[in-house]
Amino acid sequence: MTPPEDDIDQDALAAEWEQSAGGGDGDDAEQDDLAIEWDSATSGGKEASNDGTNARVLNQDEIDSLLGFEEDGERVGEGGIEAMLNSALVSYERLPMLEVVFDRMVRLLSTSLRNFTSDNVEVSLDNITSLRFSEYLNSIPLPAMLGVIKAQEWDNYGLITVDSSLIYSIVDVLLGGRRGTAAMRVEGRPYTTIERNLVERLLEVMLGDLSAAFEPISQVTFQFERLETNPRFAAISRPSNAAVVARLRVDMEDRGGRVELLIPYATLEPIRDLLLQMFMGEKFGRDSIWEGHLADELRQTEMELVAVMSETSSRLKDIFELRVGSRLMFNAAPDSQVTMRCGSVPLFTGKMGRKADRIAIQIDEQIKSRRQRG
């Protein structure tokens, strides 16, 4: 009796399966060898990275953190590489004398505002910072008044910002508001003509003190140009230009506010060298030792003096006609005054005489220059 055909096929399939299963031992050996080789490669890579020959690859979270992104892909302000680049784009120069000028302005302004408001006013300097002009315009808290000022001698502009609290406080004080009551703030409406005029008077007082504060360094007159309430209309410089901002706090008992003074670096360029010097007491950068040494060296300097007995004017034609033996007549007598000159600068006048075998001049008077006369 022969087995069915299906049983023969199943026996053949089982034999092939066992053969393939038996041959799988070689494949397992190969897989084990690959695993061992992979482990050795990974361990060698770690050792290489520890030696510094193979750099570690950043994952996506670390890349986002470096570039300043959150997990959802939104930006987190200025961070990472952008913050470093923006901080390096503008290098602000420290001006030591400018801090002295602002301190002097605070002292002068305290006295001037007390006389202006007939009230107890305290002015303090919060800080002095440097930033771009566009960043400052975007940081102004509105509503506010922006006074555009001009430095006449430097032929450039600046900006004074008065915040809303100080505006209403000044209006309340100048119009007879009672003490002990906070100034009322009415938001959502434009400033009235009276408020604008009072703020202009306040700015005039501040500009006078600002000019006086710069006086020991340079003579400058700050003039009020116009008053704006929209920062876009107070663009006195390019958005990327650097500027110095001094923030002042004005306190009048329970009232007050803030004033911000912005001066672009371009405005301060004419006196940049003066503002770079160090402040030493009340000498404003003067060094008495160096001045004494310079004065001693100047006194030992040799200079040539020329004695001019007389001068006359002639036509060029007569000069060309001069020959050997020609005579020039001068309007000078033996007792006429002789002028002593150093180059083209007249210094002394005197009379000519003789001492031993030399011609001498006796000095009678010193000639003062225009600067000495003034």
Image (cartoon, helix red, strand yellow):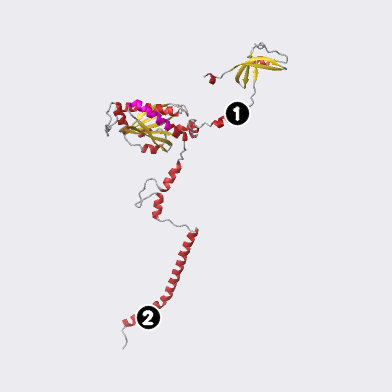
Q: Nearer the viewer, residue 294 or 51?
A: 294
Disc 1, SS: helix
| Residue 279 against residue 370 in the figure, above or below | below
- Place of residue 83 in the rendered image (x, y in percent of width and height, measured from the top left): 42, 45
Q: What residue is drawn where x is 56% and y is 30%?
A: 291
Q: Which residue is mark 1?
A: 296
Q: Which secondary structure lies at badge 2?
A: helix
Q: Nearer the viewer, residue 153 or 32?
A: 153
Magenta region: 102-118
The kind of residue on which mark 2 rests is: Ala
**Left or right: 299 in relation to 265:** right
Asked which quadrant contains residue 336, the reply is top right
Type of the residue with mark 1: Asp
For the residue carrying disc 1, how many other residues have a C-alpha within 10 Å: few (<14), some (14-19), or many (20+)? few
Residue that mark 2 sits on: 15
Q: Is residue 330 above or below residue 208?
A: above
